[in-house]
Amino acid sequence: MGSLAAIASGLLIHFLTFEGRYYFDPALSLIIVIIILIGAIPLVRRCIDVFMQKVPSSIDIPKLKKELTEVPGVISLDQLHIWTLIGNKAIGSAHITLMDNIELMTILKDLEKIFQQHNIHSTTIQPIFKKI
């Protein structure tokens, strides 16, 4: 597109005779810059979301916390982290305090299912056991 603008401005400068013809080149260059910026701004925003580990706007964190703490055997939920990895793929991690005498694999499957219902994949759950 930049090459076409350079050719067009060269032809306009060559064939037109008025004094303002020399402004075609910088004007077309500015138009090309604006078009490139309009296309680049959404890409930069998505990259910033990934680099800053932004929580996806589609995830309701209070609702997720409530559902996780309602699982039988869960005492508390600490350090819940949700962030964007690629585009709309969310990643999660949490420290979850559990009762000492529980079936760990059953609870982990229940917790994983809740994360997946909220479109959070590749979760890491750190169980912490507490005697009651």
Image (cartoon, rainbow, N blue to C red):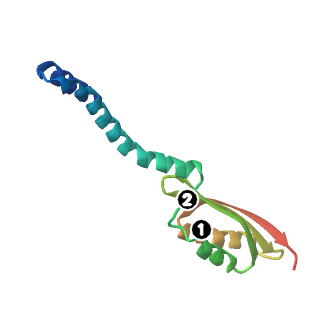
* Residue shown at the point (18%, 22%) measured from the top left: 13
User: Between 132 and 44, which is closer to the camera in this rendering?
Assistant: 44
Residue 6: image location, x then y, percent: 25, 25
- 109 displayed left or right of 132: left
Residue 125: image location, x then y, percent: 70, 63
* Residue shown at the point (88%, 76%) measured from the top left: 131
The quadrant of the image that shows the N terminus is top left
Q: Quadrant of residue 113?
A: bottom right
Label 2: few (<14), some (14–19) or many (≥20) C-alpha neighbours in 10 Å:
many
Label 2 to label 1, Cα distance in Å?
10 Å
Residue 129: image location, x then y, percent: 83, 70
**Residue farthest to the top, as pictured:** 14
Vertical position of residue 28 compared to residue 61: above or below: above
Q: Which mark is residue 115?
A: 1
Q: Are marks 2 and 1 in contact (CB under 8 Å)?
A: no
Label 1: few (<14), some (14–19) or many (≥20) C-alpha neighbours in 10 Å:
many
